[in-house]
Amino acid sequence: MKDRKTKHNNYSIELQLNDSILPNVDKAVHLEKQRSKTDKETIENTVSNKITKAIRTAYSLMSAGFHGNNGLDPSTCIHILKTYIIPTLIYGLEIIVTDETNMEKLLKFHKRMIKQIISVTQNTSDVVPYIISGLIPIVGQIHLRTLTYVYNIFLLPETSTEKQLSRRQLYLKSVQSNSWFNIVKKIFWKYNLPDIYLQLETPYKKMQLKQLIYQEVFKYWKDQMTTLVKLYKHLGYLNLESYNPGKQHPLIFIPTQSARDTYRILVSGSYIFQANRSRFNQNQKVAKCLLCGEDDEDMKLFLLNCTILESTRHATTQDIEIKLYKTCKLKLAQINTTYIGLLISTNTLKGTSNAGISLQRAFVQPA
């Protein structure tokens, strides 16, 4: 709960222990929370300490291969991030009412670390790291812990102090109150979960509600990411059909010789083509492809039409043609060029037996 604003008098009192003067401190750590004179300072100090601990945890894992240069593959690094670093970052935050400013600090740190793992630039759209890694924003992960924590309180016997306190707070506090239980009530509304008062009196079985909580939270953030992607034109080649929160995108499993591979750079819109470069360079008016010199270099030319790269893309296009004909008895000319570019850029069909089935959803007239 938030502390009420009260006037603090600065008294200077000297205490001695064994002829030594005890220092006067304005903050102290208690239960992973750095208590200060005001609630604002307490939250700021706690969040800063959490980020510092998460950074130290990441550095301690570098010897195990948690780094980009000759380190572990991105899929394994994401798993390490979920197992060791994120729990350190958000431990204890489920019982703190974090304001927007400090929550933004956690979000920025979380996004920056994911972008570094999947080797995309920091100016990449924020939805890209979440879609490729399969993670949800840190605020969603804190909400998951908060919902699990409050439900454990609901399962306690009626004689327990925590259960009695929760009933009092939920029934007596108004919507404008700063009570922690009031924040939990808003989280229930946000994810369209069953009525919190009903859960207080007759809670679901533990596994049943846990499954429901994860399902609704993941559904909410999937809808959020899917909606945001539509606002970015350069993310048209990012396959959203394979995006499921909690599961990594197939793009992250493509074996590469370097952590800084072109697959994720292409689909995230971070690759700069000549057509884009010429718009922002007054001295360079030519936007033609530097390889073939036949047309302006954009995503479509780079993936489909550049004659110099024809030998490189031939193996992938041949796989697409074979699996397309076996699955749907259609020719490559009947598929939209945008979707063909998606298949080439992400190498979706390579090494998979049933990937051609997803083509049925994209059959349109030749573009």
Image (cartoon, rainbow, N blue to C red):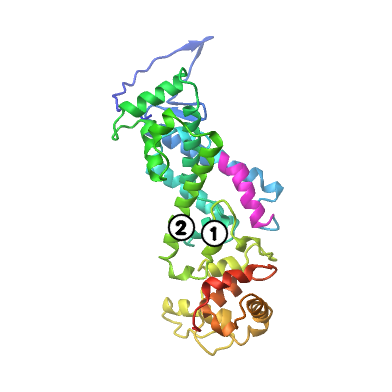
**Label at residue 74:** none
Which residue sits furthest top?
18
Q: How busy is the neighbourhood of tag 1: few (under 14 within 10 Å), some, or many (20 plus)? A: many
Along the viewing direction, whichever of 90 and 27 lies nearer the viewer: 90
Residue shown at 67% from the left, 79% from the top: 322
Q: Which residue is mark 2?
A: 225
User: For residue 344, which quarter of the picture?
Assistant: bottom right
Magenta stretch, overall SS: helix
In the rendered view, tell whether residue 13 sits above or below residue 215.
above
Amino acid identity at mark 2: Met
Q: How busy is the neighbourhood of tag 2: few (under 14 within 10 Å), some, or many (20 plus)? A: some
Along the viewing direction, whichever of 17 and 308 lies nearer the viewer: 308
Along the viewing direction, whichever of 260 and 95 lies nearer the viewer: 95
In the image, residue 83 lies in the stretch drawn in magenta: yes
Observer able to see residue 306:
yes
Q: Position of residue 231 (x, y in %)?
A: 40, 65
Q: Which residues are magenta?
A: 72-87
In the rendered view, tell whether residue 366 sits above or below residue 207.
below
Side of 345 where 187 appears, left or right: left
Residue shown at 56% from the left, 37% from the top: 207
Q: Which residue is mark 1?
A: 243
Q: Quadrant of the N terminus?
A: top left
Residue shown at 46% from the left, 76% from the top: 276
- Tell me which numbered mark, 1 or 2, is placed earlier along the sequence: 2
Side of 237 where 314 appears, left or right: right
Mark pair 1, 2: CA separation: 9 Å
